[in-house]
Image (spheres, rainbow, N blue to C red):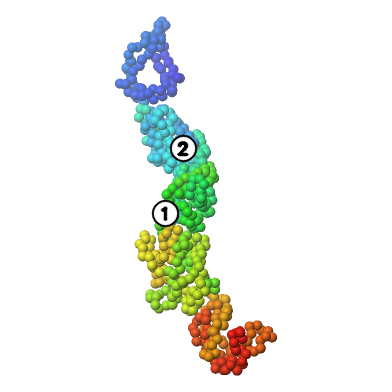
């Protein structure tokens, strides 16, 4: 095609057309004088009398040979994101086996580019056919690297290509003519990316509370939507599901991202009856979970991944004490199993000490425990325990005299701890790290007792011994009892039925700080009662006010 013949003598000049010349090169013809021969057919030429030339039976060797020393050139290229690679057009057939992608660099400008990216070994020649047009298929790493740039290889205005002389050879072994970085070739066309990203794999680490997401292509981290990710225990008909509520959005664009789950989501995952490894954990990703760099929306998928089980013992972060309500709240660092809670492991102290026998201590014996927000335990003391705490003044009477430690009843070697306590375990069954009395933890928030005590019973009246016992609803300070504020009546109501009243003049408290206060009456008061004859003459006429 396009081959022309000139001359009208015994010597003809045949000029090969581009297609014919390229065909010769592709078929490895005309490479040297020893391998170049010419054959011709009948009628290929006529003499001056019009006689046809006779076909040759053997090839005629070349008489004069000039080797191909012209270096091929890259004439144009297309950046095709649909194909995920480069389509290169050369000035002559090139040997695909000599195509080296690492010699090609995409840059944002023809000269002095602000951004450039040289292809790496993960990008490879596509196909095995030699020709004028060759292709380079981007490796995933290179594709995602290109996608991560905002101002490179996005359109014709920021896509240029430079090539080193090692980039490719023609069929004669001539190296390509270099295109320097200062004279980069502009792209002919940029074919847009229309492929949606998809989540291909995940790793959920219940120790660190992190979720690693692996995508099919580069995704913009700030476009992720946490609520589109739901963990479930089956592919269909799931009995347990945990939809994520939030996590800090990554500021990067990449094929793989690590997000830190919120403490609430992590606790919900641990507390669910799955996420324990094996084949019971699936990640259901809704459509539009995020965007790639070409603004393609994420595609829905349901996949399995890797779950790293929780093997870290929990620890106490802080505790609050409410002397007014009679409660203590323990704040742990992760979800705990309330069924494993044992209040007998708790020891309250007035201070951090070296020896337990130098400070008042108390261990609750009867409590009611409840859990809130997965990791907080509300301990409600029994009235007996609460009164015992108040009795051991100044134990937990203020924020400076309220400390806590756990008995080290379990000696187990964990990678993270040397001892643990039977106080409580996490969902995975690991017991809480112990708190030795030498490292006792002080209360974080303290609420003092602001509720006045109430007299609830007048339980003992022994006039022979001159003793009365007053019962209050809580432990009272015995030294604060003022008997002159009391009087004895012969009736329980302040009505006309009250015939007599006796006001106490004094008395001595003969008990300690208790809910039950015993008072030894004065001789004067004892005699007044006996003389009165009405007040406390019997059980029905003995009332205290």
Q: Nearer the viewer, residue 289 or 97?
A: 289
Give the residue at the far right of this rendering.
Answer: 496
Residue named by callout 2: 84
Residue at x-position 51% and y-position 54%: 247
Label 2: state its secondary structure: loop
Q: Is residue 127 above or below residue 271?
A: above
| Image coords of residue 159 (percent x, y) | 48, 39
Kindly report which numbered mark, 2 or 1, lies closer to the viewer in this rendering.
1
Label 1: state its secondary structure: loop
Q: Quadrant of the N terminus?
A: top left
Residue 458 shows up from this direction: yes
Residue 400 shows up from this direction: no
Q: Is residue 365 above or below residue 32?
A: below
Direction from residue 540 to residue 76 in the image, left or right = left
Direction from residue 492 to residue 296 in the image, left or right = left
Residue named by callout 1: 309
Q: Nearer the viewer, residue 401 or 182?
A: 401
- Within-10-Å neighbours for mark 2: few <14, some 14–19, many 20+: some
| Image coords of residue 146 (percent x, y) | 46, 42
| Image coords of residue 116 (percent x, y) | 45, 43
């Amino acid at each position: 095609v396009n081959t022309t013949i000139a001359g009208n003598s015994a010597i003809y000049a045949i000029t090969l057309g581009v297609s014919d010349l390229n065909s010769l090169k592709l078929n490895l013809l005309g490479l040297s004088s020893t391998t170049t021969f010419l054959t011709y057919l009948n009628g290929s030429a006529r003499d001056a009398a019009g006689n046809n030339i006779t076909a040759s039976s053997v090839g005629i060797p070349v008489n004069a040979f000039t080797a191909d020393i012209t270096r091929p050139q890259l004439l144009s290229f297309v950046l095709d994101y649909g194909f995920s690679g480069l389509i290169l057009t050369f000035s002559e057939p090139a040997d695909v086996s000599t195509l080296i992608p690492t010699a090609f660099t995409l840059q944002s400008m023809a000269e002095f580019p602000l951004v450039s990216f040289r292809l790496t070994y993960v990008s490879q020649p596509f196909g095995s056919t030699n020709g004028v047009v060759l292709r380079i298929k981007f490796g995933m790493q290179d594709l995602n690297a290109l996608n991560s740039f905002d101002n490179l290889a996005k359109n014709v205005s920021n896509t240029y290509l430079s090539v080193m002389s090692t980039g490719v050879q023609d069929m004669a072994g001539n190296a390509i003519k270099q295109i320097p970085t200062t004279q980069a070739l502009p792209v002919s066309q940029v074919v847009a990316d229309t492929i949606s990203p998809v989540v291909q794999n995940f790793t959920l680490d219940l120790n660190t509370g992190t979720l690693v997401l692996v995508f099919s292509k580069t995704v913009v981290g700030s476009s992720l939507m946490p609520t589109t990710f739901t963990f479930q225990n089956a592919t269909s008909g799931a009995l347990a599901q945990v939809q994520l509520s939030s996590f800090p959005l990554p500021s990067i664009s990449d094929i793989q991202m690590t997000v830190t789950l919120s403490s609430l989501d992590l606790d919900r995952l641990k507390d669910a009856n799955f996420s324990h490894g094996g084949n019971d954990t699936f990640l259901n990703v809704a459509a539009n979970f995020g965007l790639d760099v070409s603004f393609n929306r994420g595609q829905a998928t349901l996949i399995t991944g890797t779950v790293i089980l929780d093997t870290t013992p929990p620890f106490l972060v802080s505790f609050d004490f409410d002397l007014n309500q009679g409660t203590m709240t323990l704040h742990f660092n992760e979800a705990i199993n309330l069924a494993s809670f044992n209040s007998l492991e708790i020891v309250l102290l007035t201070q951090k000490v070296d020896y337990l026998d130098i400070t008042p201590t108390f261990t609750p014996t009867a409590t009611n425990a409840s859990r809130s927000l997965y990791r907080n335990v509300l301990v409600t003391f029994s009235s007996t325990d609460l009164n015992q705490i108040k009795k051991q003044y100044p134990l937990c009477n203020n924020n400076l005299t309220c400390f806590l430690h756990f008995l080290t009843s379990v000696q187990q070697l964990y990678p993270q701890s040397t001892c643990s306590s039977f106080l409580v375990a996490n969902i995975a069954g690991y017991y809480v790290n112990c708190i030795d009395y030498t490292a006792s933890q002080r209360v974080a928030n303290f609420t003092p007792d602001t509720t006045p005590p109430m007299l609830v019973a007048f339980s003992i009246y022994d006039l022979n011994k001159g003793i009365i016992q007053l019962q209050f609803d809580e432990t009272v300070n015995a030294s604060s009892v003022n008997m002159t504020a009391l009087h004895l009546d012969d009736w329980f109501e302040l009505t006309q039925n009250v015939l007599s009243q006796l006001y106490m003049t004094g008395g001595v408290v003969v008990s300690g700080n208790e809910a039950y206060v015993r008072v030894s009456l004065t001789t004067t008061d004892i005699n007044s009662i006996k003389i009165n004859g009405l007040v406390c003459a019997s059980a029905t006429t003995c009332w205290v006010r």
